[in-house]
Image (cartoon, rainbow, N blue to C red):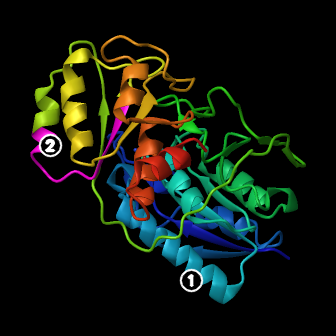
Amino acid sequence: MNKILIVHTGGTIAMQEDAQGSVKPFEINPLYSTVDSLASEALLVNDEFMNIPSPHMTPSIMLDLANRIKTRVLQEHFNGVVITHGTDTLEETAYFLDLLFDWEIPIVVTGAMRSSNELGSDGPHNLISAIKVASCEAARSQGVLVVFNDEIHSAKNVTKTHSSNIATFQSPQYGPIGIITKQNVNFHHTLANRESFKINQLTKKVVLLKVYAGMEPEILDALLARKVDGFVIEAFGQGNVPPLIVAKLEEALSRQIPIVLVSRCFSGIVQDVYGYEGGGRRLKELGVIFTNGLNGQKARLKLLVALELTNDPNELQELFLK
Ligand code: ASP
């Protein structure tokens, strides 16, 4: 029988709606009855790590979570791990764990869009699906997975695409890597690359900025006046920024503060195509680091982790091409 660790972190999946329609954390985890109902299928061990809404999540809590999983799995020999999480920052925690773990055993993150006492609550179903995936041989060595609404997504590509729909988690451009049916777990894709970083602390400050038409350069002045170790810029289209901020980016680079470029588009990657002022080609010449399809929030986590190991622009560029 598979032995699965279920680490609870909170989120709507563990919340209840009160008579006024306000959805809030609840002291008794409503998922325990679902876990109990699966007792004949697998040996399931609950770990009440925390009970927070996921907008309260931070990289330092993510690191604590990674350490908790590491300690328990190594000491108690689990075959798989399921993490329950609020959906707002679920993709960030999943990706952070994916950057840190290179394990064979499945690590699966899930959540819910409807709280435990709402009609059509999706929490129990998603939890059961996540346990099925975490127990499945084909899920081994696939990196951290996000299981939601009968689909399996890679942590690297998945993102929350809808504020309320239960089909919110999608992998733009790539699609899910598998599906869960009534009887089976079916994988139909695998990730081309996996990478893992050995870090045990997070000491850097990395800021994520989204550009917009007419963006004021003063925003960057305010940030450059403080201690910032790295910037991630969500640029227009293929990787272009308003010309007025270029001098500020140059200033950051001259101070050895790396700048990582992602696109604010939902799909696609940044490239050094445009040669006009603020265009990607000019940014590349300045030493801006180009990414390979990561969204802004994930690129920020990757830079936060990578900066613990190197500040060398060439090494960072190598890492971000993966
Ligand atoms: N705001 C909630 C959270 O992320 C949403 C959810 O869990 O679906 O904790």
Residue lying furthest bottom: 75
Q: Secondary structure at mark 1?
A: helix
Could you tell me which quadrant the C terminus lies in? Answer: top right
Q: Position of residue 235 (x, y in %)?
A: 38, 24
163 is higher (above) or lower (below) than 277: below
* Image quadrant in which you'd find residue 20: top left
Viewed as shown, does residue 294 lie left or right of 206? right
* Marker disc for residue 71: 1
236 is higher (above) or lower (below) than 15: above
What's under tag 1, amino acid-wise? Thr
Q: Pointer 2: what residue?
A: 224
Residues 46 and 176: in front is: 176
Viewed as shown, does residue 21 lie left or right of 29? left
28 is higher (above) or lower (below) than 313: below
Q: Position of residue 304 (x, y in %)?
A: 39, 55
Viewed as shown, does residue 137 lie left or right of 78? right
Identify the mark nearer the N-term, 1 or 2. 1
Q: Position of residue 241 (x, y in %)?
A: 32, 20
Magenta residues, as a range? 222-233
Compute the Cα span from label 1 to label 2: 39 Å
Asked whether residue 88 is in view, the answer is: no
* Marker disc for residue 284: none
Please rate how many residues cluster around mark 2, counting C-alpha atoms within 10 Å: few if below 14, some from 14 to 19, many from 20: some
Q: Secondary structure at mark 2?
A: helix
Please rate how many residues cluster around mark 1, counting C-alpha atoms within 10 Å: few if below 14, some from 14 to 19, many from 20: few
Residue at x 63%, y 33% (from the top left corner): 171
